């Protein structure tokens, strides 16, 4: 089975926690990955984010659980890169 090398997730979250707090929490949830968050849209109560994780063998379940734990919801997985043997 291949290992997840990169995944792009569409996330909706409340304004709190900040994207910096979310990025740090996601990095702690899977210490093998780099986290990039881009704010796509902001309204009165929520932010729509594009969360990009890159690394070796990303623990998607741990990251997904952390997003939910911090009040976010995953709308979709928009891109994924899987590889093996390198």
Image (spheres, rainbow, N blue to C red):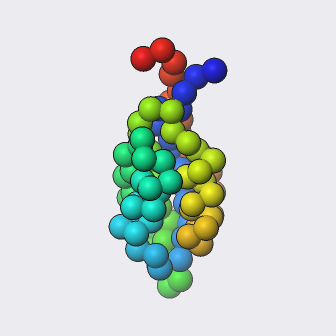
Residue 65's x, y, as percent?
A: 63, 57
Quadrant including the C terminus: top left
Q: Is residue 49 above or below residue 3?
A: below
**Left/right of residue 24 with respect to residue 79 in the rendered view:** left
Position in image of residue 56 (x %, y %) = 44, 32
Q: Residue furthest top?
A: 85
Query: Where's residue 28, x and y in %?
Result: 44, 56
Picture residue at 56% right of the left edge, 70% below the top = 70
Q: Residue at x 42, y 41 (%)?
A: 32
| Observer able to see residue 40 | no
In the image shown, does 57 or 53 lie closer to the viewer? 57
Q: Is residue 56 depicted above or below 42 in this figure?
A: above
Left-right relation of 46 to 34 = right
Residue 8 visible within the image: yes
Side of 25 relative to 69 (left or right)? left
Count how many numbered circles sit on residues in the image: 0
Question: Which quadrant does the N terminus fall into?
Answer: top right
């Amino acid at each position: 089975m291949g290992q997840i090398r990169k995944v792009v997730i569409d996330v909706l979250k409340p304004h709190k926690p900040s994207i910096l707090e979310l990025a740090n929490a996601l990095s702690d949830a899977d210490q093998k990955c780099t986290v990039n968050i881009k704010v796509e849209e902001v309204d009165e109560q929520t932010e729509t984010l594009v969360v990009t994780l890159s690394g070796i063998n990303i623990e998607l379940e741990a990251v997904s659980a952390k997003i939910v734990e911090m009040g976010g919801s995953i709308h979709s997985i928009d891109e994924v890169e899987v590889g093996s043997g390198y």
